[in-house]
Amino acid sequence: MNVKQFILDKAMEAKDGARRLAKASSKQKNTALIRMAEALKSKAEYLISENKKDIEYAANKGLSKALIDRLTLNEKRISEMAQGLAEVSQLPDPVGEITKMWQRPNGMTVGRMRVPIGVIGIIYEARPNVTADATSLCLKAGNAVILRGGSEAINSNRAIVNILRDVAKEEGIHEGAITFIDITEREAVMEMLKLEGIVDLIIPRGGEGLIRAVTENSRIPVLKHYKGVCHIFVDRDADMIMAEEICFNAKVQRPGTCNAMETMLVDEAIAEGFLPKMLRRFEDAGVELRGCPKTLSVYPNIKEVREEDFYNEYLDLILNVKVVKDMNDAIDHIVKYSSAHSESIVTMNYDRAMRFLREVDSSAVFVNASTRLNDGYQFGLGAEIGISTDKIHARGPMGLEELTCTKFIIFGSGQLRE
């Protein structure tokens, strides 16, 4: 097979699909999404059968239980995928929205209108649900999507795409709007990343290694976050009960996510009062603690944290604990070690809270709330395609609006350039 030509043909099909989809009405897109949801549920037996092939392959390859769990489809997860499609159908359509209008002295009216980005390539790993999630968001925002999942999920992803494309065709939506790279050669990704002028945006979803490889090789703009090294600073004016609940939730509720806390910073003014009870609760929940010398002086018999630990995204029940002199020290630590994903301060001091918001430069900065809340659904976006730590175009959870861009629209009455 000529992989280069194969990928080019797929991309051109998507380009045609994007052009056609940009003309689709909100009603047409919403109807297609609702029917796609129904189709996934009605063909759950087929999806589970195809998924079993991937599970068997993954087991034979010796992949981890955690990865196999992410890969597995069952009736509950298929129902959740379908629910996601239905929920996206209920969200406001951003395409065509005029976000601002103003009049110039010459009588000309200038405005901005939301339009689709065009063709979006999604490169992702084990989770088949990403296939449905990415399709629904891209389709609602008027974009064609090129899906390139991991080889370990090839049968599951192909089955999902076949169902979605069949419905799209029945609803008069060009099949190229949902394009799937159904070959597993690594070369396919490299060829896809060269297609500037055809593919408009790449969004990688997966581990740091995947994201760095995509970013280093892409000629196309990439929206990304490498990892989530998230912090919570417990200030001297914190409500201690609130601080304990927030920190526990941020670490323990689901530690394998990018918005879980990896380092807890505690103001030395309250360390002796706050740490013993907090750290005992973490240990009771199975958290491995790594503390700085000041932490060890208050709570001995835990591991000493190393310099390199502060850069780690553990994605596990492991937590760094550091006692800091004050908020200045906390912010300095965050500036040095943060991945600019999610940071929080727990405090009842208004001035320090507002200063933390101004000076901490991450995609989401919280006051008196868990970092686990950095999520498109939690923010009221309805859904998200990922969380960006970039500073251009989109930052933080990327919902429908972030899958559009704007163009200038101008209304004149014969104005000329003098």
Image (cartoon, rainbow, N blue to C red):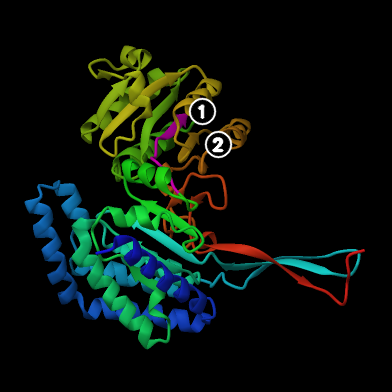
Which residue is at a point 40% across and 46% down the rendered structure image? 217
Determine whether label 1 and label 2 are within 8 Å by CB: yes
Q: Callout 1: 10 Å neighbours few (<14), some, many (20+)?
A: some
Between 51 and 149, the one nearer to me in the picture: 149
Marks 1 and 2, the one that precedes in the sequence: 1
Between 231 and 117, the one nearer to me in the picture: 117
Range of residues picked out in magenta: 224-237
Q: Quadrant of residue 211?
A: top left
As displayed, is residue 158 above or below residue 302? Answer: below
Residue 360 visible in the snapshot: yes
172 magenta-colored = no
Horizontal side of 32 relative to 40 (left or right) equals right
Residue 6: x and y in percent read: 32, 66
Label 1: which secondary element: helix
Which residue is at a point 58% across and 37% down the rendered structure image? 357
Residue 90 visible in the snapshot: no
Which residue is at a point 48% across and 25% down the rendered structure image? 336
Horizontal side of 23 relative to 186 (left or right) equals right
